[in-house]
Image: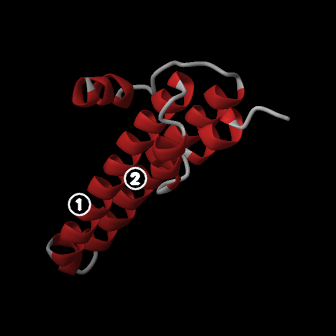
Amino acid sequence: MTDPSPLLGLLAYLGPGALATYWWGAQDPFLRFHARQGLGLLLVEGAWLSVWIFLGQTLGRIPFLGILIMVLVGLAAIGTTITWSAIGVVRVLAREKSELPILGGLIDRWWD
C-alpha cells in the first residue's frame, strides 16, 4: 500500500482542502505541519477577499481610479496566493517541512 501523506499534503494547499488534511492527518507531524500552513493560507485568502470586497464597495465606485485599484489588488491577491500554494505543493512533493515565505512564521506564532 502506498503512503497517502503526499496526496493529503497536496490538499492542504487547495483552499478548504486544508481542513481535510488537518482532520485526517492529525497524527502525522508532516501532514499536521502542512495543514497548518494551508489553513493559514486559507485565512489570508479570506482576508484578501474581504479587502477586495471592501474596496469594491468604497473606492471601486470611483470611475477610473477605483477600477484600476480593484484590478491591482486582485492581481496582487491572486499572485501571492497562487505563488504560496505552488511553493507549498512543491515542498509537499519534496517531503520537506519548511515554512511558506513571510506567512510561515506568522502561522507558527498563531498555532504554537
Q: Secondary structure at mark 2?
A: helix
Query: Where does the image place residue 47, in percent across and percent down from the top left?
Result: 27, 54
Q: Which mark identifies residue 51? A: 1
Q: Residue at x 85, y 35 (%)?
A: 1
Amino acid beneath label 2: Ala
Q: Which mark identifies residue 13? A: none
**What whole-number distance in Å separates the C-alpha atoms at marks 1 and 2?**
10 Å
Mark 1 in CB contact with mark 2 (< 8 angstroms):
yes
Q: Residue at x 17, y 71 (%)?
A: 59
| Camera-side residue of 36 and 20 | 20
Left or right, 109 with reference to 32: left
Query: Where does the image place residue 20, in percent across and percent down from the top left?
Result: 51, 51
Q: Is residue 102 above or below residue 8?
A: above
Q: Residue at x 72, y 38 (%)?
A: 4
Disc on the earlier residue, 1 or 2: 1
Q: Is residue 15 above or below residue 33?
A: below
Q: Name the residue furthest right.
A: 1
Amino acid beneath label 1: Val
Query: Where does the image place residue 49, in percent across and percent down from the top left?
Result: 31, 62
Q: For mark 2, what is the residue?
A: 77
Left or right, 3 with reference to 84: right
Query: Where does the image place residue 55, in percent across and percent down from the top left?
Result: 20, 67
Q: Residues within 10 Å of mark 2 (few under 14, many from 20)?
A: some
Q: Secondary structure at mark 1?
A: helix
Q: Residue at x 14, y 74 (%)?
A: 58
Left or right, 6 with reference to 27: right
User: Which quadrant of the figure contains the C terminus?
Assistant: top left
Q: Residues within 10 Å of mark 1 (few under 14, many from 20)?
A: some
